[in-house]
Amino acid sequence: MEAQTLSKVAGISLPRAKLWAEPLSTAMHLYDIEFDWRMAMFIAQVGHESAGFSLTREIWGPTKQQKGYEGRADLGNTQPGDGERFKGRGLIMITGRANYAAASKEFGVDFVHSPPLLEREDYAALTAGWWWKKHGCNEIADERDFVALTRRINGGLTGLEDRTLRWERAKFELGVK
């Protein structure tokens, strides 16, 4: 996707779009996010998760929810400090030691020992595409069920209004019916 198109589709500045156009295009191609409706949903969801492609790391309070990351076996957070160490990173905010380890295995990069690598544009986009495909998001996008997709990514409906606004803009700019 060209930077100018990404700027319109995602509602971001052209300089920011220039930063993200190549990594996103690569990830979308590799993980079969190439149909207009898939792209619209992907860009809307990662646009929300990353606050308009401006953050690739979860802002740490810690909030009550973030404190809950500590000791969560389902996230693989078994060692003291894992909650913050393996906070959400990347465009889709991959969270937890187990998910970092799975991404490490997939990409041959040690995200467990170097978590900030997930904040780089290339890895942030690639891991978002990988997570998206691995968790069946293309199939949900094909059904055009944006609420179900939000639940898959977020575990709930946090930010649904913003996600929906981003999706509506992306659909309009891509000419998705």
Image (tube, grey):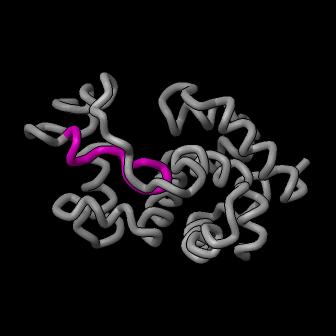
Q: Position of residue 12 (x, y in %)?
A: 68, 59
Seen at 73% across and 64% down, the residue is 7
Please tell me whether residue 111 belongs to the stretch shown in magenta. no
Q: Position of residue 125 (x, y in %)?
A: 50, 64
Q: Which residues are magenta?
A: 83-94
| Prevailing secondary structure class for the magenta stretch in the rendered image | loop
Q: Nearer the viewer, residue 12 or 89?
A: 12
Q: Nearer the viewer, residue 32 or 171?
A: 171
Q: Position of residue 72 (x, y in %)?
A: 22, 30
Relative placement, left or right, of 23 versus 177 is left
Q: Nearer the viewer, residue 121 or 52?
A: 52
Determine the image quadrant of residue 168. top right
Determine the image quadrant of residue 3. bottom right
Q: Position of residue 151 (x, y in %)?
A: 56, 30
Residue extending furthest toward the left: 80
Relative placement, left or right, of 80 versus 150 is left
